[in-house]
Each structure stands twice: as structure tokens, then as C-alpha cells.
Amino acid sequence: MKDRLKSTPGAWVISREILEASPGYPSKEELKRKPVIVIECPEEIPCDPCETICPRGAIVVGEPITNLPRIDQDKCNACGLCIPICPGLAIFLVDNTYSEKEATVSFPYEYYPLPKEGDEVNAVNREGEIACKAKVLKVRDPKSHDHTSVITIVIPKEYSNQVRGIELQQKVDKNE
Amino acid sequence: MGKETMNVELAVVGGGPAGLAVAAKAASYGVQVTVFDENERPGGQLFKQIHKFFGSKEHQAGIRGHDIGYSLLSQCEEFGVKTMLNTVVWGIEKNMLGIQNNGRTYTIKTKKTIIATGASENPLCFPGWTLSGVMGAGAAQTMMNVHRVQPGQKALMVGSGNVGLIVSYQLLLAGIKVAAIVEALPKIGGYMVHAAKIRRTGVPILTSATICEARGENEVEEAVIASIDEKGNVMEGTQRVLPVDLICIAVGLRPLAELCWMAGCKFMFLPVLGDHVPIHDENMRSTVKDIYVAGDVAGIEEASTAMEEGRLAGIAVAEELGYLGSEEADEKKNLARKRLESLRLGPFGDTRAEAKRKLTESEVNR
Amino acid sequence: MSKKDLIICRCEEVTEEEIKKAIREGADNVDAVKRATRAGMGLCQSHTCYTLIVKIIHEMTGKPIKEILPATHRSPIRPITAEILAKSKNM
């Protein structure tokens, strides 16, 4: 049922061009070179906690508060503090230097149950389609995150630009 | 026999984000405040808002709505705000309110009154809309986030404004499947980031689509959805049946302004703010002496704007009652107005900012 | 379910057809529809059906939505039992 709906004309998809053109999105070269914060926030909404929390001043929203967040990748050390604070759950950490063939993607996750470190899970893209298998590397859920866990998964490198989460770990009725 | 008439310096009708913000602010300057709320606990919509708020540090961005609610409540307590819960305000005339509490009615004499009664959800009418299982998105939110009850197992959301998107996300958090979100317009109404986090779970958001019918014997068992053309007419052959037991309606809100109408406030019709909206000046004062408005009743916006309007009204009332010098009050009011302005920037806020200007600049304020 | 039996006012169980009939007979505002059909006179005092009735009036008469005002709000705006009112001294 879901799959049929998805192919309906008019089903809304996130435009990758718009995301990649926004100032919070790293360049191709930066994505290759080092662990980078990826901000998928392409609309002028009044919001700036990412700027406030960054200890290195790498993320700038400034005035007016509706500016799109800009990130200075040279100042950013990819600490990831901005991931759980973003009310839009729109900040990710992509590390294409993890190993020769693998990358890691860290993303905010508020669903329960949480996956466990070491679990084999399905990684999904921005449309919720299963992109590839993934291994859960880290699950961070300290009090300071206020119930927005940050999950890090290991995936084949070629999927690092499309994987943005995992299939929900809630029990799924296989008959559907 | 209880006392039949009570004197209250500032009566706040409605203990949601706007009302509590007014109360805490005014009381912090020494105003004697009583908040009346018809629910068994204060906080209004704030305790249903389990997501982290947008905005800046001053707007408490990054903090979940219910935690903002707790901090407002503790401020109210600190400054000695009285709260009368399970209390219905059923009438208003000049500086008098009629209330009902615990099986009795009382007359409240006030110096100033703030009407912060919030909003009600717009309905959508289609065959089967009165079946059990069709409800406002806000109602589903109350069931899940306040009463911890799942309103269904599989849902259809009608409307993709921020309410529809946020409640869809909360349905998923509560372990309820979302079959689809339908949106009558050709594009989504709410923030893309909200839509994106729902899409990551595979929930389709169907634009230019609507609900045609809810089917079921005694409760919802199926929803019929279809694509619509630019005129809003259903395109034949596009109907599809979704097996759902919950249909949430999120097609906008409307100010809950009966008390303002009854008090004789003048109104302006501003669709972007939800409907007929009580005209108010830049201090949130209505066109009726001693009556102020704040929050959604003064135009549908968000909880963060409601709280800022509340603070602004709280400062203005404290000034009028002589608890605050005009110089200090002006400075504080300007800061509150600046915070409000910043929440009304950008493509989602500028039409609201424009409509609010029409209200405050209206000639009837003079 | 046929469109004809569509309920608009849930509290008083008034159908779309009944409201349309009232409008055809001259009820061109919310108050008049209320008097003719009892729509909006129930427990919820038109919280739910108000916008639906406005829409029907607008579609049938062409009257701009802006000019279709809510029915007069009178005390009590929330249901109160007669017993409670009778117990009150000042009312």
C-alpha cells in the first residue's frame, strides 16, 4: 500500500538541489576530505539554536534570525552538539573518512525503542526507502540531549549522501 | 455558603501559553493576578507540545513545549499568581465576569481582564465525518500526550500545515502508523524540516489531494482519498481506499473569541490570522476599556508568539495599574515587541506580521 | 452514506439539506440559520459547525465570508445547569 502511494503524482519529495544549494550544506570536496556537519535547513524560518550551541562559532545565523544557517567547515570540528538541539531534526554528521569503503552517518532519532550498538539495521534515505544495510556504531542519549538521541551508523560509502536515518525499530506487522 | 462576589485586580481568562505568560509577567511587578481555566490543569496547549521549540534563546528555542510550560507555572507560583482550575468563564460585561466553579457561580469584579482563550480547530465536513475515529489533530494530540492513550492504530492526516506535520510525527512517536498525509494545496503548508523528518519514515505526503469519505460501521474502518484539480474538484478515477481507524483533521484554527464578541470588542476579518480577530493596539489592548487580548484569540500564530504577546500585555497592564513607571515599561515593551517581530520574519511570518500591523494600526484603536 | 444526510451541526443533528433549505427560504446569516434549524444551538454552541455554516451560506448566497458574522454570543457561553444558576445569589 505504502509503495503504491509513494509513486502517486503529487507525492511530496525533498528537493536535493535545494538542500545542496543551501549554505549549511558542505561542498563535495569537504564531504570527501573530513567528517562534516550537514545542515538540511533550506527555508527562512525564525530559528537559531544551532548558532547558540556551537562552541566554536562555526555556525552563523545572525540577524535577521530567518537567515539560513551558514557553516564554516574550517572552524567546525564536527563535535555534533548541534545535532540534538536542532528543533527541526535537520542536522547530520557525515564521515566519509571512516574506512576505505565505509562511511558513517550520525542523525537525530526520537523514536523508541532505540537501536542498540552493534545492531544490524536498514538504513533509509530522505524518502524513507531502504537504501542499504547498516551497522549501529553509537547510540548517544545523554540527559543534555533531552530525549533526542544521536545515532551513528556505518554504511557503504556510496550511500553517505542519501542515507539520513534508519527504519523505525518499532515492531512492524509483517502481514502488511 | 461561598462568597458570591470576588474582587480580582487582573483576571486572566485561559491558562495556556499566552495567559500564563501574562500572569507571570504582571505578577512579577506586583499585580494581583488570578487565572481562570476550564481544564483540570493549567498550561493549555503547552503540555501537548512535546517537541523542541523553534526561535532564539530568548524564545526558549530547543526546549520542549511541556518544559516551557513547567517553567511558566513555577514563575506563576513564585510571584503568587492564583489559579482557579475547572472553572468556566461563561459571561463578561465591562469589569465583571461570570464564572462557574465546583457547582456554583460567582461574579468576579476586575480592574483589568485579559482574554487569552486560544483557538478551536476548524472542522472538515465529508460523508462519515461524524464517525468515531474522526477527530481534530489537536484532540489526537491531547489523547496521546496528555492522557497517554493511542487514538488509533493507523491514521490518515488531513492537512500539511505545521499542526498536521507535527501531530503526524507525534503519532509516529506514539507507535501509531500514518498511512498518508493529504494536502489540498499543491504544496505542503508547514516547515520543510517537519515534512522531511516524517518523509524519512516513509510516510507519503500527497499534495493536491483530499479526503472524500470515511467509512465504517460504528467507527472508522477506511478512508477514501483522491486527487483534486485546481478548483478543488475530485478527479474521477483517482480515488483510493486506505485501511485506517483514525482520521485527524488539521485544516487550521480559529480564534475562540466569544467573550470578546460578548464584551463588545471590535473585530477585523483577517483570514491569515484565522477569521474575525479582535482588534488590539500595540499593547494588546482591545477596543473595550480594560480588556486585553493575547495569544491565538488575537490571531492564530504559535505558542512562542502567544507567550511574547502575553508578556507584552502583562507589562502594559502592570504599567496601567501603576506598578511600573512609563519609562521602564516602554523599554520592556519594546523588547517584547522586538522578540515578537523576529518570530514574524520570513516567508512563514511576513503575512502574519502584515495582518498584525493592520490590527494595531486600525483607527478604532484611537 | 448519501451526501443528503450529511450532518453539519452534530449537537442538534441538523443536516446539510435542512440548512440549505433554510437558506433557500431566506436565512442568509448564521443567526437566521440557527433560528430556523437549531444549528449551533446545542452544547458546543456552534464551536464546530460555525465555519461549515458560513461556507454553505457563502456558497449559496454569494455573500462574502467577511460579512458573515457569528451568531450573537450570550451568557452563558458554556453549558451551566439551571440548578447551579438558581443557587447563585447575584445572577
Image: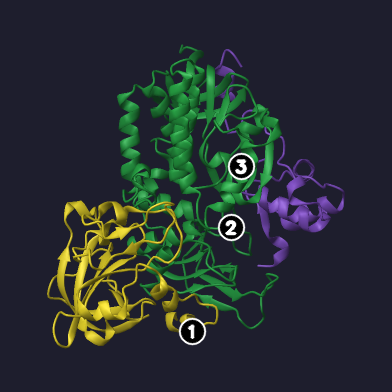
Chain colours: A yellow, B green, C purple
For residue B239, above or below residue C70: below
Q: Secondary structure at mark 2?
A: loop
Q: Quadrant of the C terminus of chain C?
A: top right
Q: Label 1: few (<14), some or many (≥20) within 10 Å? A: few
Question: Residue B125 at x, y = what percent?
Answer: 63, 59
Label 3 amino acid?
Answer: Arg
Q: Secondary structure at mark 1?
A: loop
Q: Do the numbered discs 1 and 3 sit on residues whose CB atoms are within 8 Å? A: no
Report the chain holding disc 3. Answer: B
Marks 2/1: CA–CA distance: 31 Å
Q: Which residue is mark 2?
A: B130
- Using the image, tell me which numbered label, if any, was put on residue B357: 3
- Using the image, tell me which numbered label, if any, was put on residue A7: 1
Q: Which residue is located at x 45 percent, y 38 percent? A: B308
For residue C84, above or below residue A73: above
Report the chain holding disc 2. Answer: B
Label 1 amino acid?
Answer: Ser
Residue at the right extreme, as displayed: C25
Question: Residue C89 at x, y = what percent?
Answer: 57, 12
Q: Nearer the viewer, residue C21 or A130?
A: A130
| Marks 1 and 3 belong to one chain | no
Q: Nearer the viewer, residue B215 or B196?
A: B196
Q: Is residue B277 visible?
A: no
Q: Do the numbered discs 2 and 3 sit on residues whose CB atoms are within 8 Å? A: no
Label 2 amino acid?
Answer: Thr
